[in-house]
Image (cartoon, rainbow, N blue to C red):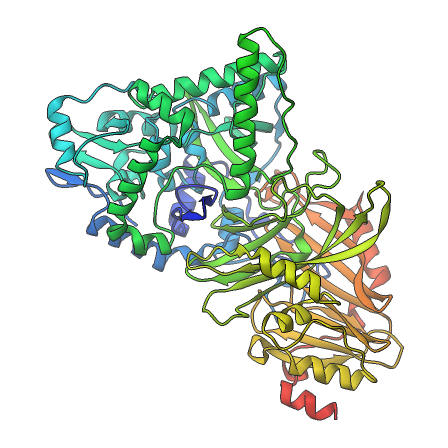
Amino acid sequence: MRGSFVYHRKKQSRKRYRTFGVLTAVLLAMCLLASCGPEPGKEGGSGKADGSEIFSEPDSGGGKGKEDGPDSVAGQSTGDSMAASDMGAAQTAKTGAAAGPVPGESASAGASTGAAAEDMFSHPIQGEIKQVDAQILEELQAFLNEDSSYGFLLSSYDIPEEIDLNQVFYSGAGFKQEELTEKEKELLLDRIPQKEIRTPVVKLKKEQAEELLSQKAGISYDESRHPLDQEDGWAYINRYGTWYALRGDTNRQYINCSDAWQQGDLYIIHYQLMAQAPEKADSTEADAAAAAAEENAATAETAGTAEAAKAAETSETAETTETAETVETVETSETAEAAVTGETAAAAETTGAAETAEAAETTAAAETAEAAAAGQESPVEEEKNALYRPTYEVQLQKTEKGYRFCYNIVWTQKNLIEAQSYQAELKPAGEVFFAPYYPDTDQDEKADVTFVLEKDRAVLAILDPMEASNIRTDRIFAGVDAVDFTDYNQDGYMDILTICTYTQIADDGRKSGEIREARVYEGQEDAVPLLDREKTEAVNRDVEVLNITNVTGYLTGQSDGKARKYDSWKEAYAAHIEGIAEEEYEGFGLIYLNDDRTPELVQLGATTAKGATIVVYRNGTLEETWLNRRDFQYLEYENLLYSPSGVENLHFDTIYSITGGKLSISTQGYYGNSSFARVRFDENGKEVRDYFWEGGQVSESGYRDGISFLFDLSRAKTCQGDQLLTAAQLLERLK
């Protein structure tokens, strides 16, 4: 997703940011040999330790910028067709997060291959690596916060050629801005659909672009796969060798680094994007807020005029809004199709959810700075929020002139609720990764889960929270029970249904039991579903037993939501099968997990996004458990089901059992490298893995013994292929 890590939603308007094409194997190899770290040893290529047959493994499985003519406006047909070709031909091959073994294969699948594996192994960490001290971390953070640096962190890429130049130069990249001459204004007005220039103009000379790209990316302008010539909003005047862009806003973000690691001249840094400059440890809160306000003003001045500073501070004056609408309206004819396919470039700000947090932060910072200037205490304490902030990983290489950017990606595995993460197809974005993230309980114990869509190692969108601050009023998050991707309203756009469990909090603060809550995200033309609050409220009010089947039945009008009592498991399963969309499933089966003489119903999804569903009958009611992988195994009559899965360099082994009439997680372990987004090798090329079982770190042999003690794979059964029945066949057996 090129142009930004995040999806920007403002007043229900939408802007899509471009994504990047997949890297070829040759370019990956060149990157490894040139400036992006050592190549792993041959022994580490598979990423598989000896005797690891009981462990899960991951899935297997544009050219140079063209200079315009004598005088041109970037983003016309040639550039657009090239960008569209990149999107259609290459992007979908590069997956955002490899996940679990290939359906139909066992957990003993070999090493990963294909685009997902290339992602993971394209920048491996080999040999000794050490964490830097606070002084070096501060130096690295200062570098990343430079006006000429932060734009390199607003797009995802595996090699510097994939950097989004629009984001790098969006606000001028720190170059001094000069007033336009009358001749420049005349030529620029000939190239834009406006009669006058009413917003600040960013000027960028070609030699300036070449200088910055050479210094901080190690590439020339012509080597970029996403040059400004292909960007809407940039006009190039050949007479001056300069690009021009009208700006009513800024893409300025600040970088807050959490940790950094050094290996020779390479540095791996983890960071988050912030609306305000991070505070220094030895600063008072008021001083930090005042400094942030001054830095914001200084950034705005780089746009060229005092009017730019005013626009950056207010961002929503009537003049700016009018101009922005004019530009957007005129560009619509050229960019409407591009926006639908993710080709529209835009300023990297935040999602609708994060935008709320940043607005609150900006307001609080301004008030604090104003009070500090007057020698007073802050008038208000900043309101808490638990809106999700992604963690990113960037690799820098030390040079004589500073640092160069090697790669920049979102750290998908950080705080991920892996058991309910899915690969899904959302038109027109293509394959995306649905990632639920644990709440930030450091902010508040009632912080809520966050649902994120990722693509090409970048955040495509953060889905709407239930409450603005993402802090619940009367409940504490306990877990994600189920996620379903279905076009329940048959409008051609994929909808997302979720079921979560919470611990309810009474008015007096006491915990008063568990409750379930559903959410209904309705698919949109731009592939990013919106939370339908009216339908979500209706579902939670009317559906007495919240599970995906009951919610879907209610939304489609097949059910009024009232709980139904069945006289037998055959009657219950038959009614259940008749109420679902058969085409969404590969097949069905009956298995015996425990020894109560009542079989469990298996629904195997037709796609990886559908996963597998285990339906348990007990005392006239049904309970569903949704697994995010289809290739589970079970021990008949022993109440044990084993589901292996994985995301990038982390692999999970989960064992389920039926308790209280519902299939739930009994035991879980995981192994791999939890310190980095990329795979790590030792000096001999063997993948470095840490092992965790039931929350505690164990040895590799201890991990193996833990699984073997509970689950004997040699006696395990599956429910695949010829073992499956069609809906009609199963209904016949249930008669």
**Residue at coordinates 59% horizontally, 44% vertically from top-left?**
679
* Residue 504, placed above or below residue 721: above
Relative placement, left or right, of 332 versus 633 is: left
**Residue at coordinates 22% horizontally, 42% vertically from top-left?**
74
Where is residue 612 shown, x and y percent of the image? 66, 69
Report if residue 238 is visible in the image.
Answer: no
**Residue at coordinates 73% horizontally, 61% vertically from top-left?**
54
Out of 357 and 244, give the one closest to the viewer: 357
Out of 104 and 655, give the one closest to the viewer: 655
Quadrant in the picture for residue 576:
bottom right
Given the current orientation, which residue lies at the most extreme right position? 596
Report if residue 530 is visible in the image.
Answer: yes
Where is residue 297 shown, x and y percent of the image? 41, 18
* Residue 203, placed above or below residue 562: above
Out of 57 and 332, give the one closest to the viewer: 332
Quadrant in the picture for residue 563:
bottom right
Where is residue 109 shown, x and y percent of the image? 63, 63
Relative placement, left or right, of 319 versus 639 is: left
Relative placement, left or right, of 593 versus 352 is: right
Out of 127 and 240, give the one closest to the viewer: 240
**Residue at coordinates 63% horizontally, 45% vertically from top-left?**
467
Quadrant in the picture for residue 64:
top left
Q: Where, quadrant-wise, is the C terminus in this rendering?
A: bottom right
* Residue 553, placed above or below residue 263: below
Where is residue 341 shown, x and y percent of the image? 37, 56
Relative placement, left or right, of 343 versus 623 is: left
